[in-house]
Image: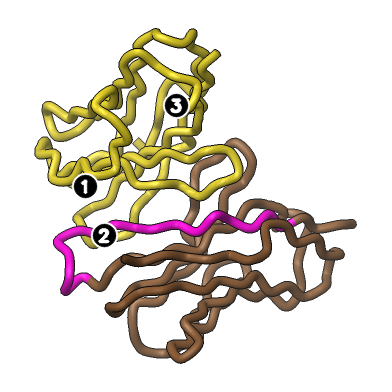
Chain colours: A brown, B yellow
Amino acid sequence: AQSVTQLDSQVPVFEEAPVELRCNYSSSVSVYLFWYVQYPNQGLQLLLKYLSGSTLVKGINGFEAEFNKSQTSFHLRKPSVHISDTAEYFCAVSVSARKTSYDKVIFGPGTSLSVIP
Amino acid sequence: GAGVSQSPRYKVAKRGQDVALRCDPISGHVSLFWYQQALGQGPEFLTYFQNEAQLDKSGLPSDRFFAERPEGSVSTLKIQRTQQEDSAVYLCASSLGPLNEQFFGPGTRLTVL
C-alpha cells in the first residue's frame, strides 16, 4: 500500500526567505506524485505533478519540486516566499496508471506554511 | 460551471440526524470523487464514480455513508444517523476522465453536535 509522510506539520518562514517542505512516500510500485495547496476556506489546487521524465518539476506560483527515487522523496521548494503563500500544502501520490483504472490519490497529513512579514 | 461547487458550505447537525451533501462537478467531467478531511489531516478517499456507476466505495467508513450519482452529473453524499466522529470537511473532486487532473470543490464543513 502507498503512504505519504510530511514530517513538518508547521513551517514558519519570513517573507522573501526560501522554503522547503518535505515529503516522503512509500510504495512498492511506481507512482505519480503531486503537491496541492489549500488556501483558507477554499478547495485544493494542484501546484505541480511528477508523472515521468525530468525529476525537477516546475509548478505554479514559483514553486518547484524534485523527485528522488532512491530517497523516495518529493520535496517542495520556493526561493522567495510571499505573504500570499500562507496556506496548507499537501503532498500526494497515486499509483501508476498501468496498475489502476482510475487515479486514486493518497494524501499526506499536510504542512501549514506561515509567511511572516 | 466554472468549477466544482458544493452545497451547503457549512452544515451543523445534531447527533442522530441524517444529512445530504451535494456536489456539482464541472460539466462534462466523467469522473467524480468524494474525500473526507478531518481537522488537521489530509483528505482521505471515500468513493469514486465513473458517470453514474460507483466503481469504488472502499473508503466509506460505515454503512451509514451512502453516495449516488444517478444521472452521471450531480452527486449526493448521504450520512445517516450522524455521529460526532463524522465531523469533517467533505470534499468533492471531478476530472475529465479517470486518469486526468482532479479539480476540487470548496468542501462542506460538517459539524455534528
Q: Bounds of the magenta span?
A: A97-113
Kind of residue at badge 2: Asp
Amino acid residing under circle 3 = Asp
| Residue marked by disc 3 | B86
Neighbour class for label 1 at 10 Å: few (<14), some, many (≥20)? many
Q: Nearer the viewer, residue B61 or B46?
A: B61
- Against A41, residue A94 (above or below) is below
Question: How many residues crowd mark 2 within 10 Å: few (<14), some (14–19), many (20+)?
Answer: many
Relative to A92, does residue A44 appear above or below in the rendering? above
Whether A110 is among the magenta residues is: yes
**Residue furthest out toward the right:** A117
Q: Are marks 1 and 3 on the same chain?
A: yes
Disc on the earlier residue, 1 or 3: 1
Percent position (x, y) of residue B71? Answer: 12, 28
Classify mark 3: helix, strand or loop: helix
**Which residue corresponds to mark 1?**
B31
- Is residue A39 shown above or below A63? above
Residue B2 visible within the image:
no
Which quadrant of the structure image shows residue B101?
bottom left
Please report the residue visible at 35 percent of the width from the left and 44 percent of the height from the top. Answer: B93
